[in-house]
Image (cartoon, grey):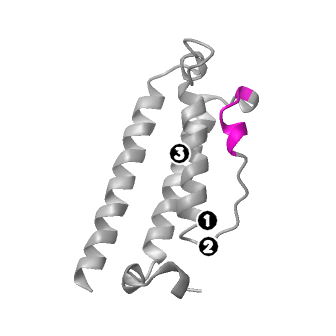
Amino acid sequence: MQIEVEFLKIVAARFSAAFERIGHAVSQLSDEQIWHRPSGSSNSVGIILQHLWGNLHQWIYSGIGGHAFERNRPAEFLELNIVPKSELLIRINVLDKKVQETLSSLAPDSLLTPPHSRI
């Protein structure tokens, strides 16, 4: 069981480090830079962040953690909900906390149990 505990620690640390790097990068941009799209077929940093938020909520917070979450994936790629940098930084921190809480709530021995057997 020691390997499962170490695995969860490493995954949690890597997520935390990634969130820290994302927050650092976003904090250096202006609102205009965050939502800038070089072309109509390009995504802005803001759109990519919306998509990341949706993915991690769907697969980690909801999928692994069992929390309710409804996702509208196509809307993540639209600039319908342009939010300021300050709000994006808050969302990044909140999502980091949710991922950390989800990972810390996992029983290490459940990692070796097939998903259909956990129900």
Secondary structure under tag 2 reads loop
* Circle 1: residue type: Ser
* Circle 3: residue type: Ile
Q: Which mark is residue 95?
A: none
Q: CA distance from mark 2 to mark 3?
A: 20 Å
Quadrant showing the C terminus: bottom right
Q: CA distance from mark 2 to mark 1?
A: 5 Å
Classed neighbour count for the residue bearing mark 1: other residues with Cα under 10 Å, few (<14), some (14–19), many (≥20) = some
Q: Main secondary structure of the magenta part?
A: helix
Classed neighbour count for the residue bearing mark 2: other residues with Cα under 10 Å, few (<14), some (14–19), many (≥20) = few
Q: Residue at x 33, y 54 (%)?
A: 14
Image quadrant where residue 51 sits? top right
Q: Position of residue 81 (x, y in %)?
A: 73, 32
Image quadrant where residue 68 sits? bottom right
* Residue matched to label 2: 66
- The answer to whether 66 appears left or right of 107 in the picture is right
Q: Which mark is residue 62?
A: 1
Q: Is residue 15 above or below residue 52?
A: below
Q: Is residue 6 above or below residue 38?
A: below
Instruction: Choose the circle earlier in sequence order: 2 or 3.
Output: 2
Q: Position of residue 62 (x, y in %)?
A: 61, 65
Q: Is residue 71 above or below residue 104?
A: above
* Circle 2: residue type: Gly
In the rendered image, residue 22 lying in the magenta stretch gets the answer no
Q: Are marks 2 and 3 in contact (CB under 8 Å)?
A: no
Q: Which residues are magenta?
A: 73-79
* Residue matched to label 3: 92
Secondary structure under tag 3 reads helix
